[in-house]
Amino acid sequence: MIALILLATSMLEQADEISMLYAPIVAKQPTPSQTRQTDAALQTASNWFSMGLDPIEEKLWVVLADIGIDALELKGLKDGFDVRYENYGKVAMAAAKKDIVMIGTVLSSTKKDIDFAFALKNAGTYPELYSMVEIAPKDWNLLPNGNIPWLTLQKLHEKGYVPKEFAPYVKQSEWNATGPICGVDKKTRRWIYLQDREGLPRLDWLSPSFGSLRLAAADALISFYRLGQPILQLDAALPDNAKETMSLTIRKMGGFSAAFSKGGIDALRQSTDLVYDHLTPIAALHALVAEDAEALRITYQMLLDEEIQPKSLIHAMEPFGRAPCDWAELLAAPTKKHRYYEEVLTAEALRRRLLYEDVLALGGKAGDDLPFLTWPETCASLIKIQDLEERCCQILELHVLLAKFFAWQPGVFSLSMEDLLGTVHQEHLYTLGGTFSSQLKSILRARREINLEHATLIDVPTTEQRGLLILRFELPNTYSALVAVNFSKQPVSENLESPTYYRTTAIDLETHLRLNKPLDSTFFTLKIDPLSAKLILFQPKIYR
C-alpha cells in the first residue's frame, strides 16, 4: 500500500497525469515551425534580469521597469515539479503590472528522491530514466562506495560498462557507485550512475522509454500553462535530440525556448529559438585585462564566417557564474590554425597564451585556473589603487564599459542582481547600485531606440588600435550602425571607410549629438575615450 502511495507521487507518474490534462489544449495549437523563431522571441522580451526567489520590494520593481527590463528569471523557483508558490504569485502579479514577463526552466536532473529510489530498486521503467548501469557481482570488487576514481573508470571501460567519456587524472569523476540494493524482484544489485555538478543523478535522454522527455515535457507544461512563462530555458546537458524535441514542444504550446550551451562554435547551432553565448565573454575578459581586443575580433569573425548571428544569442553578464568558459572553441579544435597578429598559431597554443595572460592579470600565477568571478569582482581585481573614492569611480567605469559591450549588440541582453547592485567586499569598498542603474537606463534606451536587438552583424573591421573593437550592423530599417568599444586606457582615433557611410550623418545614440563626418564622404574618423564605448547610427539625409 505504501509503495503504491509513493508510486503515485513520483515525477514519472505525475508527468503522465500532467500531459493528459493539457494534451487537449496543446492539440488545438497549430503545427510548430521547424525554423527558429528568434525575432518573435526577441519581440516578447530582449532585456532579461535574473535573481533569487526572494521578496522584491516595490522600489526594485520601479528600478527594473525604469531601466527597461522586460523579462525576469527567478532562480530556485522549482524543486522537481513542486513550485515554490509562496513568493511566486506575488512576484508574477507585480511583474505583469510592469509588463515584465517571466522566464522558466526545464529540468535536466532530479533529486535522489522517489523516482531515483524506484530506479535503484529496478522497478518498472524507472532505471531507464537515468544514466545508470548495473554491475555484475563478479566485478563488485572494483567499485568504491561513492565517487569512482579515474583508474577504476578505466577498468570499467575495459569491461564494457562505461563509454570512454571521462577526463584522465580528475579527482572527482561524474560517475558514482551505489552499495548493494535489494530490488523489487528480491535481487541484490550494485549500480553506477552519472551525476551533474551538484551531485544530482543525470537523466538519460536517449532511453527507449522516453521517460526523461516525458518528465521534461510535463515540466514545460507546468511552466507555460500554470506559471505563465512564455520563455523556457533548457540545460546544456540535454543532447541535441532532446533540445530539438523540447523546442518543438514549447513552440507548439506557443512559447519560446532558450538553451545553455557548451563546447565549440557548433554548440551555438541549436534548434532552440535563442542560445546563450558562451564564447565572447571569455574573449571580452581578455580584452579588458590585456587591453587587447584581437581575440574578441577573431571570435566575432568566426561567428560571421559560420553564419551565426549575434541576434540569435543571449549575451549574459555572467561569464563565470553558470559554467566555465575557457576558450571553448579553441579547446574544441585544438589543432586548427589561427592568425593572431603576425603569427599563425594552433588553437591550443593560442589558448594557452591567452589564458596565461588572463591569469597573471587577475593576480594568479602560471598554471593556475581562471578564477570564477562575477564582473564586479573582476573589475575590482583589476583596480590596484587604494584611494576609496577613486577606486569606486574606476570600478564603476569598467563595469559600465562591460554593460555597454554586452547590451550594445543584437540578441538578448541579460544581467543579474549581482551586476545591478555590484559586489560589497569585506572592506566595504563600494556599491555600484544607483549610479550603475542610472547609466544602464541610458544604455538600454539607446539599444531600444534603433531596435538593435534585431540587427544583423555585417562586418568586424580590422583596427589599427589593439584595444579597439568595432562591430558594424545593419538595422531592421536598413540603416547602418556601429558599436565601438575601447578596452585600452588610452584615447584612440581610427579612420573607417564604408559605402554605407555615404550621404549619412553620424549620430552618437547615447548623447544624441551629431559627430564630425562629412555628408558626402564614405570616410569617418572615430574618436573614443579610454575605457569607453559608443553606439553610432548613420542616418541618411532625407530629401523632400
Image: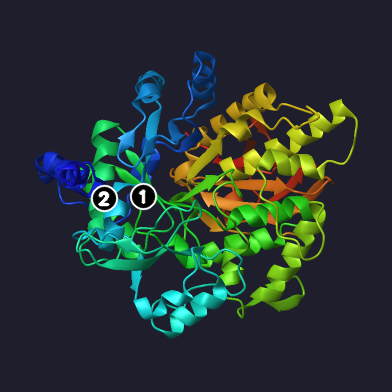
Can residue 497 be seen?
no
User: Residue 4 is drawn in which quadrant?
Assistant: top left
The amino acid on which the numbered mark 1 sits, given as a three-letter code, is Thr
Q: Is residue 366 above or below residue 290?
A: below
The amino acid on which the numbered mark 2 sits, given as a three-letter code, is Leu
User: Residue 336 is drawn in which quadrant?
Assistant: bottom right
User: Residue 64's x, y, as percent?
Assistant: 52, 24
Mark 1 to mark 2: distance in Å? 10 Å
User: Residue 489's x, y, as percent?
Assistant: 83, 46
User: Residue 441's x, y, as percent?
Assistant: 58, 27
Q: Is residue 506 above or below residue 361?
A: above
Can residue 160 be seen?
yes
Mark 1 vs mark 2, foreground winner is 1
Residue 369 horizontal side relative to residue 174, left or right: right
**Dot 2: element:** helix
Q: Residue at x 25, y 67 (%)?
A: 187
Q: Residue at x 66, y 75 (%)?
A: 348
Callout 1 touching callout 2 (CB < 8 Å): yes
Residue 477 horizontal side relative to residue 211, left or right: right
Identify residue for label 1: 110
Earlier-in-chain disc, 1 versus 2: 1
Camera-nearest residue between 123 and 502: 123
Total marks in image: 2
* Residue 215, numbered label: 2
